[in-house]
Image (cartoon, grey):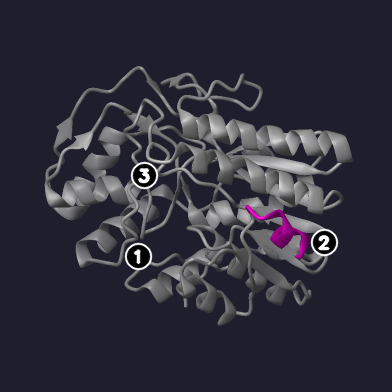
């Protein structure tokens, strides 16, 4: 068994990966002592929700503090629901698009809101708008006194100059494309109800949470391994290990306020796509192949404010790159959900 001070050199199975993603650090264990039971995780059937819910459950157990963690989602796949229940998380099938189903959710003083839809926007923009706006209004009406940590996205910003430090939370929101505009609309719904009802909300603008089964690093590493060109047009990006992102989302609840505040949630450094691909080339014994040329702007967020408030993401980038390369090389299971990080037109 490794500790956070003794990270594994490689991860060989999904069991090892999930254990690491849900292993609570001392800062999280201490922070959950202030949370009252139950805590609702809404939209818990997606990419981040299952590990976030189990991380919270394990932190509460380590603290000796009872917090019933309830995960609500449509659970279109039974896999996530069974996985959660086997680890002590209660599950509630719920379509958050339906106001009546939201009304039946149990009372809670703390909510983590993970509902969102990005990919498939081009084919069905109306669904993207519905999923990214209606549930936020339903939830705010149902829980006017709850603290809410709500996931948003760095796509709400315009592309930023490379070398300029990235977009900050006070920058104007200048979304590009249907998805990004719908994400701004989601934020405005939370802001409206927060101002109307005094609901404390924190908006977390996430850029690229990564783990080994999906994410921007997996996309780059697979291209290098398969001898496919890595597109350099979006030449720089931020990312954060999903375990770190989950922890910071939970710990951010105490900073919710009315009117809402926003925090950029990502790694503090802008990373060169070219350099990441070359690093994977060395780790995989392949030569990285490239297409396109780095543009002077990219989707970049400045995470200084979040780092000052919650601390820097602790998982070393070198470790994440090493784990990802090994996972790709051994043929570990992937979710086959490409990030389309190279898209500069907002079309997903």
Name the residue that disc number 2 marks. 34
Q: Are marks 3 and 2 in contact (CB under 8 Å)?
A: no
Quadrant position of the C terminus in the picture: top left
**Residue at x-position 69% and y-position 32%:** 188
**Residue at x-position 38% and y-position 55%:** 319
Residue 144 in percent (x, y) is at 84, 48
- The span picked out in magenta is 97-104
Q: Residues within 10 Å of mark 1 (few under 14, many from 20)?
A: few
Depth check: 75 or 228 in front? 75
Q: Residues within 10 Å of mark 2 (few under 14, many from 20)?
A: few
Residue 27 in percent (x, y) is at 68, 59
Q: Residues within 10 Å of mark 3 (few under 14, many from 20)?
A: some
Q: Is residue 44 magenta?
A: no
**Residue at x-position 41% and y-position 21%:** 162
Q: Secondary structure at mark 3?
A: loop
Q: Is residue 39 left or right of residue 279?
A: right
Q: Which one is closest to the eye, mark 1 or mark 3? A: 3
Q: Is residue 300 left or right of residue 327?
A: right
Q: Which mark is residue 339?
A: 3
Q: Which one is closest to the eye, mark 1 or mark 2? A: 2
Residue 56 visible: no
Question: Which comes before the other along the chain, label 3 or label 2?
Answer: 2
Name the residue that disc number 1 marks. 9
Main SS, magenta region, reads helix
Question: Which comes before the other along the chain, label 1 or label 2?
Answer: 1
Residue 46 visible: yes
């Amino acid at each position: 068994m490794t500790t956070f001070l003794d990270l594994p050199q490689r991860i060989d199975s999904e069991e090892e990966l999930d254990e690491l993603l849900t292993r609570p650090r001392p800062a999280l264990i201490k922070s959950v002592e202030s949370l009252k039971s139950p805590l609702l995780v809404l939209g818990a059937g997606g990419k981040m929700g299952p590990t976030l819910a189990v991380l919270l459950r394990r932190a509460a157990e380590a603290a000796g503090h009872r917090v019933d963690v309830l995960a609500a989602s449509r659970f279109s796949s039974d896999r996530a629901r069974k996985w959660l229940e086997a680890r002590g998380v209660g599950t509630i099938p719920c379509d958050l698009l339906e106001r009546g189903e939201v009304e039946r959710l149990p009372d809670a003083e703390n909510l983590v809101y993970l509902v969102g839809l990005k990919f498939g926007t081009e084919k069905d923009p109306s669904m993207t708008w519905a999923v990214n706006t209606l549930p936020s209004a339903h939830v705010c009406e149902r829980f006017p006194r709850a603290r809410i940590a709500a996931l948003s996205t760095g796509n709400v910003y315009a592309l930023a100059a490379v070398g300029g430090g990235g977009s900050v939370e006070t920058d104007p929101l200048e979304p590009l494309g249907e998805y990004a505009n719908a994400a701004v609309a989601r934020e405005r719904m939370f802001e409206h109800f927060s101002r109307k009802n005094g609901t404390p909300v924190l908006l977390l603008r996430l850029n690229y949470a990564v783990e080994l089964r999906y994410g921007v690093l997996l996309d780059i590493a697979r291209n290098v391994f398969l001898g496919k060109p890595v597109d350099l047009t979006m030449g720089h990006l931020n990312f954060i290990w999903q375990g770190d992102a989950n922890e910071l989302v939970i710990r951010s609840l105490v900073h919710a306020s009315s009117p809402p505040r926003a925090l950029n949630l990502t790694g503090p450094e802008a990373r060169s796509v070219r350099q990441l691909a070359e690093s994977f080339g060395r780790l995989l014994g392949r030569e990285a192949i490239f297409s396109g040329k780095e543009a002077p702007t990219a989707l970049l967020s400045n995470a200084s404010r979040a780092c000052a408030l919650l601390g820097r993401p602790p998982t070393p980038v070198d470790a994440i790159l090493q784990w990802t390369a090994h996972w790709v090389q051994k043929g570990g299971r992937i979710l086959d959900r490409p990030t389309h990080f190279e898209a500069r037109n907002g079309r997903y």
